[in-house]
Amino acid sequence: MTQVLSDNLLCLFYLLLWVLTLAWYQYKNHTIDAGTAIISTYVLYAIFSIITLNDDFFSIAYNPLKLFPFIYLYVMLMIALAPTIYHHLNPPKRIIEPHSKILVITAILTIVMAATRIPEIISDFSNGIKLFTDVEGGNDAYMEQIEKTTEQGKSISNLFAIIDNTLSDLPVFLFFYFLTLKKKNYWILGGLLFAISNCVVLPVLHGQRGSVIISVLTIIVGYALFKPFISKRINRIFKIFGLTSMIIISLPIIAITMSRFGENVVGAGGIVNWYVGQGNLYFNNYGLDAGGIRNGDRTMFLIKMAVNPEDTPKNYFERREKYHQLKIDDYWFYTFVGDFTIDFGPFYAFVIFVVFNFIILLLTRPRDGTIKVYQMLLLYFTMCICMQGGMTLYSYADYNGLRIIVLLMLYTYLRYHELLLEKFPLVQSSENDDSLEDVDKDK
């Protein structure tokens, strides 16, 4: 058997695993939800892996493939998906509203931080115009951001931008949660929609495709998570709005791709195939043996900075220099699973995945057909990890770990507040009693 045939058979086997998983999941579930969305992307990535593997230009980038790395990757992704699958196969009937204004306060803070980026949008707007008028426009904007990144960790140039990025997961979660409420505040919903649009517009102006794609994937998973609790009328509106938005968003992504790679010998189409399909193949080659480990410097960056800041690289340039002996670095995609195996090795990465997702399963199980908002927040977090990193890398690495801290702070407050109310029900205000009556009427 030739190596080319062997590699293709292994890729087909991996694709078949996800096709069968999707078929099993839909047979058990009978509806389209977050699990469907995430597994469907894994099917798509596996298809693109086959396409790029058979591209004459890119096929030389990969070493011969092996069976076990694909099995390991599949098992790890299924472990990461376990909370999502359990949630949708045992769906709660109702979300219990928290008796607190913290979500409204958080939404207002998120909207205000998004509004502080308006001057940046205005100043960089010319870059957006250049995407469609200048063949080098997207590449120029991207290289400008690369130069700024070299200084990351040495100074804080825009505090508002850092806070806004730290809160970037919340607009999607809050927007779709507020859509499930009986009494909707359309001013807050409009502000959150603006904050969500910022997460798409700003990366476009900076010539970045990856951040745009991650934002779109986050919107999809957020909608799919809350879809069962949103009215049919709003669901219909969102489907039309969502499809239109996808078409609009695809235009600048295509323009950026053409700008950065259109003159390349392989063309923009070949680059897209390689961009989407490389994660599975590079994981197969290097995910279980990259010639060493990074000791958590990427996935546990903030913890390493707190424990040993002198020996912790401040950005990916410094990290690549420190671990120059590795066979692969984070310039390439090897999925979020690969980030953990390269940081800790295959065994300890497996242990981390099992322990973490088992804890999430215990913390997010519905009770009496209901689920709390803080449980939904944990589910959303795990879904974001699976959705955002299935093609690329672990999206909460480096300073993006601040996003985890924000989510955990909100989770802790909501959980502590709920437990306090359960122990001391008399502290509930008359306003909260009214909301409880509303909830009872909804039963």
Image: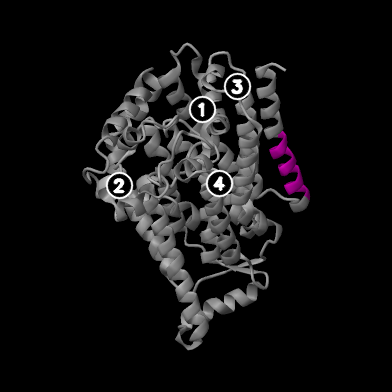
- For residue 386, which numbered disc appears in the image? 4
**Magenta-colored span:** 16-27
Q: Which residue is mark 1?
A: 275
Mark 4 crowdedness (10 Å alpha carbons): few <14, some 14-19, many ≥20: many
State the mark number for residue 53: 3
Give the residue furthest to the bottom.
426
Pick the front one: 111 or 57: 57
Mark 1 or mark 4: which comes first in sequence? 1
Identity of the amino acid at label 2? Ala
| Real-space CA distance between mark 1 and mark 2, rounded to the nearest whole angstrom | 28 Å
Q: CA distance from mark 3 to mark 1?
A: 12 Å
Which amino acid, mark 3? Answer: Leu
Residue 216: image location, x then y, percent: 51, 41
Is 21 magenta? The answer is yes
Q: Which residue is mark 2?
A: 161
Residue name at image x 47 percent, y 46 percent: 344
Compared with residue 45, is residue 262 higher up or lower down, i.e. above or below?
above
Structural crowding at the residue carrying mark 1, measured as other residues with C-alpha within 10 Å and reported as few (<14), some (14–19) or many (≥20):
some
Q: Is residue 185 left or right of residue 117?
A: right
Q: Secondary structure at mark 3?
A: helix
Numbered disc 1: secondary structure = helix
Looking at the picture, does residue 347 appear above or below residue 63? below
Residue 37's x, y, as percent? 63, 44
Label 3: few (<14), some (14–19) or many (≥20) C-alpha neighbours in 10 Å: many
**Do the numbered discs 3 and 1 sit on residues whose CB atoms are within 8 Å?**
no
Label 3 to label 4, Cα distance in Å? Answer: 23 Å
Q: Nearer the viewer, mark 2 or mark 4?
A: 4
Q: Is residue 419 magenta?
A: no
Q: Quadrant of residue 188?
A: bottom left
The amino acid sitting under disc 1 is Tyr
Binning the other alpha carbons within 10 Å of mark 2 as few (below 14), some (14 to 19) or many (20 upward) gives some
